[in-house]
Image: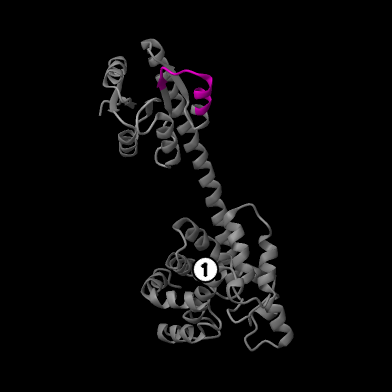
Amino acid sequence: MDGKRSILVVDDIKDNIDVLHAILKDDYKIQFALSGRKALELAKKHKPDLVLLDVMMPEMDGFTVCKALKDNPSTKNIPVIFVTANNETMDEVTGFEIGAVDYITKPVTPTIVKARVQTHIQLSNQKQLLFEEVRGKTKEIFNTQVEIINVLGRAAEYKDNETGKHVQRVGGYAYILARAYGIGPDESELIMMAAPMHDVGKIGIADNILKKPGRLDEEERFQMNMHSAIGGVIIGDQVSEVLRYAKIIAEQHHERWDGQGYPGGIKGDSIHIYARIVAIADVFDALTSERPYKKAWTIERATDLIRSESGKHFDPSIADLFLENIEEIIEVKNTYKDG
C-alpha cells in the first residue's frame, strides 16, 4: 500500500470530476461516481477518508446523498465537503444541518481545494484518535464494573457454601437463553454480566440461617427470602447499565410465573424478562451441582423438573427455550466445572 488517503469525488458531469482529480491525484487515491446512488454504493464498500460531493445532480441530489451517508452507521463518520456553484446561504445552512463539514464553490481554486481537503482529513483523524482513546477508557471502566460484580457475586456464593463457578455458569446459561429469546447480543451480554449478582443479598443474611443444615422454620424462611430485597438495596439505583440489570435480577429472580414466589408475589409478564431468564438458569445449576447438604441431580432429573414446572414456577416460553438449547447449556456446565 502507498499510504495515501482516499477521496470519493461525486459529480454528474465528468469534466468537473476530471478537474478535481487533476488537483488531488498526486496526494490522494481518487475514486469517482457520476450519480448519487453509485456514490452511496462506493462509500459503503470502500469507506473513503473524505467525500467531495456536488449538490445539483439529477435523480438524487447532494443533500439526499449526504443525509443517506450520515444515516448509515458504516459511513456516518466520513467527512463530506459540498462542491457547488450555488453558494446561497440557505443551501449552506441546509448542508451543515445534514452533516457536511465544509463548502467549496465552483469554479474551484486548486490551493483552496487542497487546503480544505487536508484540513478536514486531519480533523477526522484527530477525532477518530480521540474516539478510540475515550472508547478505551470507557471499556476499562466497564471492565472494572464487571470485575466488581463478579467479586461480589462470588462473595455471596462462598458465604452460602457454593462456588464461584456457580455464578459463571448461571451467567453463561442466561446468555444462551437471552439470545434464544430474541434479545440482541449486546443486551444478552449485559444480562450475562449482571447475572452473577443474583444472590448478592445473601451477604445480609445471618450465618445461622444461611448455613443451617436442616429445614428452616417459618421465621427463618421469611428472613432467608429477604435476600432478594436486600440484594436490590445493596446494588442500589445506579447509572451503570449492567448494575441496573443486576438490580432487576437480584430483586426478581425468585418470583414465580404463577405468582407464588417472593419477595413481591408478582406473576407472569409482570416479572422482568431478565429475572425470568436467570430464575431458570439458577434453579438448573443449583439442582445439578453438589453441595454439602445434597447430591447433584442428573441432567435428566433436572430437565424433567423444569418441564413439569413450566407455567408454574417458570415462564413456559423460557422453559421451552431451555429444553431446546440443552446441549449448549450442558456445554457451559462442562466448561465451568467445580473443583
From this view, report whether residue 91 is shown above or below residue 109. Answer: below
Q: Is residue 84 covered in magenta?
A: yes
Give the residue displayed 68% in from the left and 63% down from the top.
Answer: 234
Instruction: Determine whether 170 is above or below 83 in the image.
Output: below
Viewer-nearest residue: 254 or 160: 254
Residue 265 in view in this figure: yes
Q: Is 143 rendered above or below residue 3? A: below
Query: Quadrant where the N terminus lies?
Result: top left
Residue at 38%, 10% in the rendered image: 109
Q: How many marks?
A: 1
Q: Nearer the viewer, residue 141 or 186?
A: 186
| Percent position of residue 40, x then y | 34, 36
For the C terminus, the quadrant is bottom left
Image-based side of 236 in relation to 29, left or right: right
Q: Residue furthest right?
A: 219
Badge 1, how many Cα within 10 Å: few under 14, some, many 20+?
A: many
Residue extent of the magenta highlight:
83-94
Rendering coords of residue 49 (x, y %)? 37, 29
Q: Secondary structure at mark 1?
A: helix
The quarter of the picture where residue 322 lies is bottom left
Q: Amino acid at mark 1?
A: Val
| Relative horizontal placement of residue 293, taking residue 105 as reference (left or right) | right
Q: Residue at x 55, y 51 (%)?
A: 144
Q: Quadrant of residue 274?
A: bottom right
Q: Nearer the viewer, residue 201 or 252?
A: 252
Can residue 158 be seen in the rendering of this structure?
Answer: no
Residue 326: x and y, percent? 39, 76
Q: Looking at the picture, how far across and down is residue 111, in whole percent? A: 39, 10
- Residue bearing the label numbered 1: 167
Magenta run includes residue 77: no
